[in-house]
Amino acid sequence: MEREIDIKKINPVLDELAEVKGSLITILQHTQEIYGYLPQEAIRVISKRTGIAESEIMGVATFYTQFRLTPVGKYMIMLCQGTACHVNSSEAILQTVTEELGIKDGETTPDGLFSLKCVACLGCCSLSPVMMINDDTYGSLTPDKTRKILKELREAE
């Protein structure tokens, strides 16, 4: 079930860009900044205001990995799966996160607190294995260190 959203929040974006040719990606980026994802209701409104078919908008939204069609948790965990992280046991870190939170790549915990996304590279190879949680980077991870980080975030709530 989709969260209720205030659809009027995207009106300024559409007022500025709906008539601008080639602005769909920019509209989708702004929409995601507003809501944290691309709600189906927003896609319908964007379609009506721009004249672009919903199916075409969905094609763009699903083609680019930057776009999300479901809400994400308060803490977005991006777990690096690049070569350096892989050879330094990122798989053990993934297993730890999965066991601790009960979610897999692309999923969000039922309480809406954590989302997990495996990424190709975070550009922090010297810290491997590494993950980012929102804007914070955690490196030289071990399963125990990972459990401690997740526990501290959960307790902070």
Image (tube, rainbow, N blue to C red):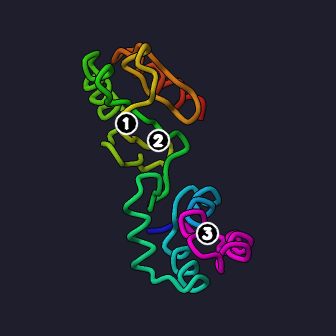
The C terminus: image quadrant: top right
Chain part drawn in magenta: 3-26
The residue wearing badge 3 is 5
Q: Mark 1 to mark 2: distance in Å?
A: 8 Å
Q: Residue at x 32, y 28 (%)?
A: 82
Asked whether disc 1 touches disc 3, contact meaning CB atoms under 8 Å apart, the reply is no
The N terminus: image quadrant: bottom left
The image shows residue 48 at horizontal and vertical percentages of 57, 86
Asked whether disc 1 touches disc 2, contact meaning CB atoms under 8 Å apart, the reply is yes
Mark 1 vs mark 2: which is more N-terminal? 1
Mark 2 packing: few (<14 Cα in 10 Å), some, or many (20+)? many
Q: Secondary structure at mark 1?
A: helix
The residue wearing badge 2 is 114
The image shows residue 126 at horizontal and vertical percentages of 42, 13
Whether residue 145 appears in magenta in the rendering, the answer is: no
Q: Quadrant of residue 123?
A: top left
The residue wearing badge 1 is 101
Q: Residue at x 65, y 59 (%)?
A: 34
Q: Is residue 94 left or right of residue 115?
A: left
Q: Residue at x 48, y 68 (%)?
A: 2
Q: Is residue 76 above or below residue 124?
A: below
Q: Residue at x 39, y 41 (%)?
A: 117
Q: Mark 1 to mark 3: distance in Å?
A: 27 Å
Mark 3 packing: few (<14 Cα in 10 Å), some, or many (20+)? few
Q: Secondary structure at mark 3?
A: loop
Q: Is residue 11 left or right of residue 140?
A: right
Q: Amino acid at mark 2?
A: Phe
Q: Secondary structure at mark 2?
A: strand
Q: Mark 3 to mark 2: distance in Å?
A: 20 Å
How many marks the image carries: the answer is 3
Mark 3 vs mark 2: which is more N-terminal? 3
